[in-house]
């Protein structure tokens, strides 16, 4: 139950570390046993390495299992439609299905709290009016955040993505006190409001912000806090199977891990857990429900584990935020660009010999450039660029910001399909 005016959302956040580790281990063993019996994907995984689930199943057993990646989910769901053998509960108990890029069908049961602890830690309370600028369309973000905010007693303005000026008007009229979105978007809202002649700090009631979907650079955070007097908080979330895996407290010294997940930081090649402080891939096993037979989901995000106690009193370990990507998918303006999907787009165009995506960041905005090497000339380049751009939008849900034709041989033989050149400091 939520504690209305307490320091923490619930008592679990401050329980002694040893106790919380014991509870998590018990939940892990129970989750694996259940998944083995009810999810074909989980059973295949355990049978593959010859592990029989039992009440003694622990973290070192988990380490022996292969990592399941976003691309595996796409393949699994293609082979065993619609859910890839990942559904471990009765199909009729699925309350809703989201469609993420891939496509990946994400099914959810009713009544699960995914984000409330994170919003509570960000200072959202009853009496706040918070504008939710994440999309309510297809993807889980809008609706899940909405429900988490409600669990903190917040009034939610159902905005979604879209018209900046309508958002500015609503923020003024309704006296919005909180903002949910990406840092890039908030900055563009502030700039637009200033262009319209407003003094943002004086004319707007906005005080609290919460970000996810992209990293919050220290310089931008400083601008929000010092220039615009906004409190800032961020969370690390994954959509499969959806939730705030880790979230910031007021100490802003790393993101606290949520007990509803087992989070491992591993060597992306070997899948072995690395020591605290070492950088590795974030691998997540959800524990919160008997619904997803998803074990060891590899997020592709890199981070490190922080085990020193936090001044806020929350006893959970933390992660250092996202430090980069392992390579098979890159998040651009909050949307994953998956190598396989990009290849699918380009494969439809015979004249393209090779392609590469370069992601950079300019003026606090992600930029995606698509480089193309042509096979046969002459080609109507502008027309081809338009067609590829259109197909990119359909399949990857994002258009390249630029399409550049490069000379044959420019893209080397051993190239990475997506190069992420963004620097976060
Ligand atoms: Zn803390």
Image: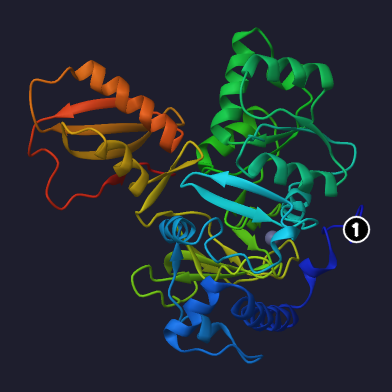
The residue carrying pointer 1 sits among few (fewer than 14), some (14 to 19) or many (20 or more) residues within 10 Å by Cα, namely few
**Quadrant of residue 383 in the image?**
top left
Q: Residue at x 35, y 33 (%)?
A: 368
Q: Does residue 41 lie above or below 29 as drawn? A: above
Give the residue number, with chain letter if any, for mark 1: 3
Direction right: furthest residue: 4
Q: Position of residue 354 (x, y in %)?
A: 17, 40
Q: Position of residue 220 (x, y in %)?
A: 54, 35
Q: Is residue 265 left or right of residue 347?
A: right
Q: Does residue 385 lie above or below 330 as drawn? A: above
Q: Is residue 118 visible?
A: yes
Residue sitting nearer the eye, 260 or 222? 260
Q: Is residue 401 left or right of residue 93?
A: left
**Quadrant of residue 194 in the image?**
top right
Q: Quadrant where the N terminus lies? A: bottom right
Q: Position of residue 424 (x, y in %)?
A: 43, 44
Figure quarter occupied by ligand 1 = bottom right
Q: Is residue 170 left or right of residue 31?
A: right
């Amino acid at each position: 139950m939520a504690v209305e005016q307490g320091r923490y959302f619930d008592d679990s956040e401050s329980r002694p570390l040893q106790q919380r580790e014991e509870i998590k281990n018990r939940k892990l063993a129970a989750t694996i046993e259940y998944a083995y019996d009810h999810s074909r994907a989980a059973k295949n995984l355990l049978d593959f390495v010859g592990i029989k689930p039992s009440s003694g199943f622990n973290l070192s057993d988990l380490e022996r299992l292969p990592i399941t990646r976003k691309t595996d989910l796409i393949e699994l769901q293609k082979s065993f439609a619609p859910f890839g053998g990942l559904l471990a509960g009765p199909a009729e108990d699925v309350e809703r299905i989201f469609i993420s890029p891939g496509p990946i069908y994400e099914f959810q049961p009713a009544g699960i709290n995914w984000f409330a602890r994170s919003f509570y830690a960000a200072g959202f309370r009853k009496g706040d009016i918070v504008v939710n600028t994440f999309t309510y369309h297809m993807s889980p973000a809008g609706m899940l955040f909405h429900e988490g905010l409600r669990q903190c007693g917040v009034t939610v303005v159902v905005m979604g993505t879209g018209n900046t000026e309508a958002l500015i008007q609503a923020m003024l009229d309704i006296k919005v006190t909180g903002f949910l979105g990406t840092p890039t978007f908030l900055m563009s809202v502030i700039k637009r409001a200033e262009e319209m002649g407003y003094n943002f700090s004086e004319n707007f009631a906005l005080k609290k912000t919460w970000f996810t979907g992209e990293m919050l650079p220290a310089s931008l955070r400083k601008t929000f806090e010092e220039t615009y007097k906004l409190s800032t908080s961020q969370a690390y979330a994954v959509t499969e199977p959806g939730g705030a895996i880790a979230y910031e407290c007021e100490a802003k010294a790393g993101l606290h891990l949520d007990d509803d997940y087992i989070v491992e930081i591993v060597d992306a090649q070997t899948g072995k857990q690395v020591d605290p402080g070492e950088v590795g891939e974030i691998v997540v096993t959800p524990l919160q429900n008997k619904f997803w037979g998803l074990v060891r989901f590899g997020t592709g995000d890199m981070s490190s584990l922080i085990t020193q106690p936090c001044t806020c009193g929350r006893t959970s370990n933390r992660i250092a935020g996202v430090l980069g990507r392992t390579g098979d998918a890159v998040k651009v303006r909050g949307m994953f660009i998956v190598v396989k999907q990009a290849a699918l787009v380009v494969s439809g165009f015979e004249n393209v010999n090779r392609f590469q995506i370069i992601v950079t960041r300019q003026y606090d905005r992600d930029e995606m450039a698509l480089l193309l090497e042509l096979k046969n000339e002459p080609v109507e380049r502008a027309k081809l660029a338009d067609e590829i751009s259109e197909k990119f939008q359909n399949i990857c849900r994002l258009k390249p910001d630029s399409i550049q034709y490069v000379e044959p041989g420019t893209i080397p033989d051993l190239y990475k399909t997506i190069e992420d050149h963004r620097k976060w400091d």
